[in-house]
Amino acid sequence: MSAQHVDVVVAGAGVAGLQAANTLAEHGLSVTVVEASDRVGGRIHTAYTASGEPVELGAEFVHGRQPRTLAWLERASLSLVQADDRIVWLAGGQPQPLDAVLEGYGIIEGISAYEGADVPASDYLDALATQYSPAAIQFARRYIEGFNAARQEKISTLWVAKTEAELDANGGEHNYRVMQGYERLPRFMAEEARRLGVTFRLGQSVSTILLTGDGIEVHTAAGDILTASACVVALPLATIQKHQSRLLPHAHMLTDALASLEPGFTYKVSLEFQVPHWPADVGYIFSSPPDIQTWWTRPGSSVITAWFPPEPAEQTPFTIPQLREKTLASLASVLGIARHTLESTLVAMHQKVWHGADEFGLAYSYVRVHQLAAPARLAALNLPGIYFAGEHCAPGYAQGTVHGALASGEAAAERVIHRLGGTH
Ligand SMILES: Cc1cc2nc3c(=O)[nH]c(=O)nc-3n(C[C@H](O)[C@H](O)[C@H](O)COP(=O)(O)OP(=O)(O)OC[C@H]3O[C@@H](n4cnc5c(N)ncnc54)[C@H](O)[C@@H]3O)c2cc1C
């Protein structure tokens, strides 16, 4: 057991924690970051093909021109490339009309102006049955569930409206990828933090955060104790929800705010082939059930990514062989290509299961119906010395995004600086 005192312990080295660490250190505070995994970046996690093409296992797109993200990318000399937004709807390899997609996007545009009573998105969409085709409403359901990794019966329509409006205001109709791989960003942020004197304890899980009379004690699973004047808790929502009584035993008032936010789950599986088997001039391939409905690729790439939610009744996540089976069979059906042709040219499958089976498995959070104020309530919780950061308590309506996580880290650091003072 060892003890160490710093001004601030940051729990979690995702982008929220990394932003907080940088801001705090820039103001002259001593900071230690404790991270359970042996890498920084959390839900930004890039794999690479043998030829060096990035394959994003977690966050992939910068939604529009997000100033905080852009500023970091520029500092890190990383470049963005606009994602190809051309769509094809395929069944058995045959292109289908896009009427339902266009009409469905119209429904989503309509939601961003919605200011009525809050209802679950499922109710909002059901009420449109006389105005739109069933296929368009189905597309809108899939969009809301897919984009937000959410269940339509739980997600707040007002929150969807606000998030869509906020994205629109920042050019969110276009998505961008980090050309060199998104994970280069958190790695750069960690290097910058180290340069400012921040210490990292990787591979060390925070087990308990205690309020003592004159500060905070942060206990690690290995038995180390760090004492600090403040702690920024930048852990995933699912981790805090699951381990609240052990992690934050003093934080009884957390329970309500935590229950208003919902961890979202998804599967994201990228299949890497020797050659692309799909049309060269598309960014997105949509298809109908029972096939996986959403796929995307980059121009000229031999990698295609499937994005699909767990079934509502699914108790245990798919195993890796089951994921391989499901994605290959579905892609063969969508493209109208024999399964063995696909399999014989498959180079690799890249995936990470964001299903919630363990504490790292949350995709990203969304707000339940009638709980629009929950993220702000969580961010502003008054526990002396404990400050929350993370995508789930992003300011405004940027929950579930990288730019929201960055903003939450900065906001938490500013509150700490306000309390402790900084030297710069
Ligand atoms: C599949 C997927 C796709 C996504 N796509 C996009 C996208 O296209 N665009 C976008 O903007 N956003 C996207 N997101 C969301 C985005 O990745 C997250 O909102 C953001 O990265 C969250 O950052 P964070 O710092 O809040 O949390 P995290 O990145 O989860 O960081 C929390 C850290 O805490 C660590 N930790 C957990 N438990 C402990 C413990 N007990 N002790 C110490 N450390 C612990 C974790 O290992 C992790 O490193 C996506 C997410 C997923 C999963």
Image: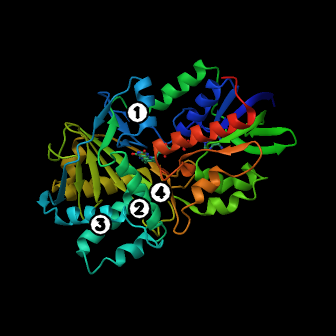
Query: Is 120 displayed left or right of 389 in the figure?
Result: left
Q: Earlier in the sequence, mark 2 or mark 3?
A: 3
Pick whichever of labels 3 and 1 is earlier in the sequence: 1
Question: Which residue is depicted at the point 22% across and 66% down?
Answer: 103
Q: Residue furthest top?
A: 195
- Give the mark nearest the N terminus, 4 or 3: 3
> Do the residues bearing badges 2 and 4 touch, measured as CB atoms within 8 Å?
no
| Residue matched to label 4 | 265
Q: Mark 4 and 3 residues: CB-CB less than 8 Å, in contact?
A: no
Amino acid at dot 2 = Ala
Quarter placement of the N terminus: top right
Residue 145: x, y in percent?
39, 62
Q: Give the distance between the C-alpha atoms of the residues marked 1 and 4, in whole angstroms.
A: 27 Å
C-alpha span from label 3 to label 1? 30 Å
Q: Which residue is mark 2?
A: 161
* Residue 184 visible in the snapshot: no
CA gap, disc 2 and disc 1: 24 Å
Q: Quadrant of the C terminus?
A: top right
In this view of the protein, which residue sits in the foreground, 217 or 314?
217
Residue type of the residue flagged with mark 4: Phe
Residue identified by numbered label 3: 107
Image point 15% across, 57% down: which residue? 336
Q: Earlier in the sequence, mark 2 or mark 4?
A: 2
Q: Residue at x 75, y 58 (%)?
A: 252
N-terminal label among 1 and 4: 1
Q: Amino acid at mark 3?
A: Ile
Query: What mark, if any, has residue 121 been given in the picture?
Result: none
Q: Is residue 391 above or below residue 105?
A: above
> What's the amino acid at mark 1?
Leu
In this picture, is 251 found above or below 125? Answer: above
Q: Which residue is mark 1?
A: 70
